[in-house]
């Protein structure tokens, strides 16, 4: 099935900029994106621990992308019909590349 390359929200690969914090264990991290979305991130190829407390741009593959996209579509439809709950995206990302934007997270 072909995907519309202009529809970044439906891609299996994402590039997200935000603040990285330590997760529940040494290999898990949380990325709070500038747009309010939250991501649980991990990586076997790049050292995320070196960037805790930094603003970073992370590129990676969405875990369970099909289920993730269905969940986000449902949230979008609910929002479009007047549901006012938080519509920020939340997902899991396996990071393949990371770039430091800043050595601190600005508020």
Image: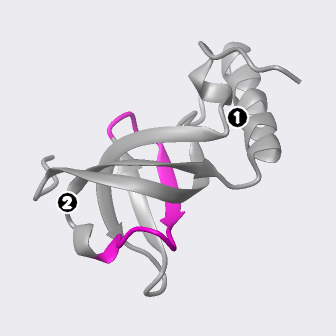
Q: Which mark is residue 54?
A: 2
* Dot in front, 1 or 2: 2
Taking the spot 68% from the left edge, 28% from the top edge, the residue there is 10
Residue 45: percent from the left, percent from the top? 47, 69
Q: Is residue 47 above or below residue 67?
A: below
Q: Which residues are magenta?
A: 34-49
Q: Main secondary structure of the magenta part?
A: loop
The Cα–Cα distance between marks 1 and 2, rounded to whole angstroms, is 27 Å
In this view, the residue in front, 52 or 45, is 45
Query: In the image, 94: left or right of 106?
Result: right
Query: Compared to 29, does 64 lie above or below?
Result: above
Q: Is residue 47 magenta?
A: yes
Q: Which mark is residue 10?
A: none
- Which residue is found at the position 48% from the left and 56% from the top? 96
The residue tagged with tag 2: helix, strand or loop? loop
Vertical comparison of 12 with 44: above or below: above
Please tell me which of labels 1 and 2 falls first in the chain: 2
User: Where does the image place residue 41, in percent across and percent down from the top left?
Assistant: 50, 63
| Residue named by callout 1 | 72
> For this view, does 85 lie left or right of residue 1?
left
Q: Position of residue 73 (x, y in %)?
A: 75, 28
Q: Is residue 34 above or below residue 78?
A: below
Front in this rendered view, residue 1 or 83 = 1
Task: Classify mark 1: residues with Cα within 10 Å, few (<14), some (14-19) or many (20+).
Answer: some
Question: Horizontally, is 97 left or right of 79 in the view?
Answer: left
Q: Position of residue 53 (x, y in %)?
A: 20, 66
Looking at the picture, tell me which residue is in the foreground, 78 or 13. 13
């Amino acid at each position: 099935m072909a995907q519309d390359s202009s529809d970044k929200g439906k891609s299996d690969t994402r590039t997200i900029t935000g603040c990285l914090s330590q997760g529940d264990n040494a290999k898990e991290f949380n990325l709070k994106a500038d747009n309010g979305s939250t991501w649980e991130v991990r990586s076997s190829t790049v050292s995320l621990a070196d960037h805790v407390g930094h603003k970073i741009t992370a590129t990676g593959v969405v875990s369970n992308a099909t289920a993730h996209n269905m969940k986000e579509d449902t949230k979008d439809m609910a929002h479009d019909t007047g549901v006012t709950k938080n519509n920020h995206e939340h997902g899991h990302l396996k990071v393949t590349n990371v770039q430091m934007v800043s050595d601190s997270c600005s508020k």
